[in-house]
Amino acid sequence: MRFMYIVTPAHPMPATTELIEAVHKLAEREIKAGHMLDSGALMPRTLGAQVRITDGRLSVIDGPFVEAKEVIGGYAIFELRDKEEAVAKAVEFMQVHRDHMPGWEGTCEVRAFAGP
Amino acid sequence: MTAADIHRTILAVWRIEQPRLITSLSRMLRDVPLAEDLTQEALLAAVEHWPVTGVPEKPGAWLMATAKRRALDQLRRRQMLARKHEMIARDMEQDQQAMPDWDAALDDDIGDELLRLIFTACHPLLSREARAALALRMICGLTTEEIARAFLLPEATIGQRIVRAKRTLSESGLAYETPRRGELSERLSSVLEVVYLIFNEGYTAARGEHWLRPQLCHEALRIGRVLTSIAPHEPEAHGLLALMELNASRTAARTDASGEPILMLEQDRALWDQLQIRRGMQALGRARELEGAGGFYALQAAIIACHAQASTADETDWPRISGLYSELAALVRSPIIELNRAVAVGMAEGPEAALVIADSLAHEPALKTYHLLGSVRGDLLHKLGRHAEARAAFEAAAALAGNKREQDLLRRRAAEPPT
């Protein structure tokens, strides 16, 4: 099964070098293990936009924003056995955040791909 | 969480840790089959304790500590060269006191050890079937039951196969060896063959419809990716990975809603997985950079790449495919490759030239019971307007097809009116 992970920090603060290194190590392991198919870093949500439909009305929520332009958060695509394995990986990934950047808060959303 | 949920969570965590466990223990014990036994014991220990204590915060460290403790017991029990090993044991105990060794574990370069593991599981001394079972068990962490379900065989059969294979390795002194540099490429072919066997078992799904069969494709792909990362200079490892990624990219398009197979040229190409195609093309590019474009797997990948890169069936570069098949046929003499070449020639040059090749295969013993020869001939005859002969060929093919859905497809073709 394929899963999309979307990591969104609660606060737009740049990751510490220590955290970045730990995450890279983990990513390298997952690439070598054949689990991670693709990944990328994302700019803060405030540099993007949200296009929504509510009550039949279409709205675009967009800047201007005055926030730091550091990369925060990212996405990754994994191929794994099942949801349990996907959750275990996300827990491991978030534990790395807790160990290497105390005070970091945020979410790692795990979404399963549709299809075979 | 129900007991079943906890069990699945434990299995998931264990599967993540299993490669690191087995490689660390192999290095400690210098015995891969024994290391595999002990990682299974660590799993059993987790199944026994975690439902009571909850999953530990650092489950990897817990499993590693448990497995290492058992390995230490083994070393002590063996009482090998008392003094020297006691020193090793003492070092290890100190190591363990320094737990949790999460960072150390992350730092561990398990590449060489993993390569040793793969080469052991796929040793040419073992039968292909034994190699496949052992690889799924030792490299992918599948349980005996899962392997049995995937291969549609009784669990006892797979269990025996694994036990016997491990015994063979231990008795022949091959429990812990790494091929020498010069041997690497040669030994690798024995590994690639097994990986491809596992992939095809899942991909062709000639029998059964269990979900674990596509899972076999995923496991084969995963071993393929592992191999290219730990043996990055072997062009055929990249070639095989390219072939598997490119073939797997069509999975969603291969059957319709009712499960009927859809032929490649009629598939909805929007359903082809572009991420996987991109990965396949990258792997093929790497094989070519390593001067492996003419390899057995790389050539087959190049053929599939021609399809993957055509945005419609009409845009397929058939002359190139036909040329690649000629290269492949020169490399490996196989009536099945010849038959595929006939199809490509038919598309590139027309049905007449193709029928000459297909007819030359009529007496091949290997194709006597192979339904695709009749299927290809039927198609060529149909295009040439020789409808009575086409119908006879399709009907003969339908009688040989093992899969119900394929039989139906061939019968439909036999009933097709002249165009």
Image: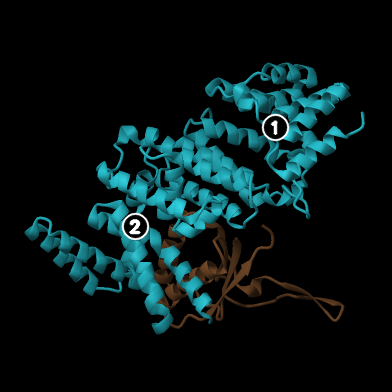
Q: Amino acid at mark 1?
A: His
Quote the CA–CA distance across marks 1 and 2: 42 Å
Q: Is residue A103 above or below residue B331?
A: below
- For the colour cyan, the matching chain is B
Q: Nearer the viewer, residue A42 or B378?
A: B378
Quarter of the figure with the C terminus of chain B: top right
- Badge 2 is on which residue? B36
Q: Residue at x 72, y 30 (%)?
A: B317
- For the colour brown, the matching chain is A
Q: Chain of mark 2?
A: B
First along the sequence among labels 1 and 2? 2
Q: Is residue B196 above or below residue A53?
A: above
Name the disc covering residue B226, or none.
none
Labels 1, 2: one chain: yes
- Badge 1 is on which residue? B371
Q: Nearer the viewer, mark 1 or mark 2?
A: 1
Q: Nearer the viewer, residue B106 or A82?
A: A82
Left or right: B95 in relation to B82 = right
- Give the percent coordinates (x, y) of residue A25: 41, 62
Q: Chain of mark 1?
A: B
Q: Residues within 10 Å of mark 1 (few under 14, many from 20)?
A: many
Q: Residue at x 55, y 45 (%)?
A: B199
- Give the percent coordinates (x, y) of residue B136: 46, 52
Q: Are marks 1 and 2 in contact (CB under 8 Å)?
A: no
Q: Residue at x 52, y 41 (%)?
A: B196
- Give the percent coordinates (x, y) of residue B221: 53, 49
Q: Nearer the viewer, residue A17 or B385?
A: B385
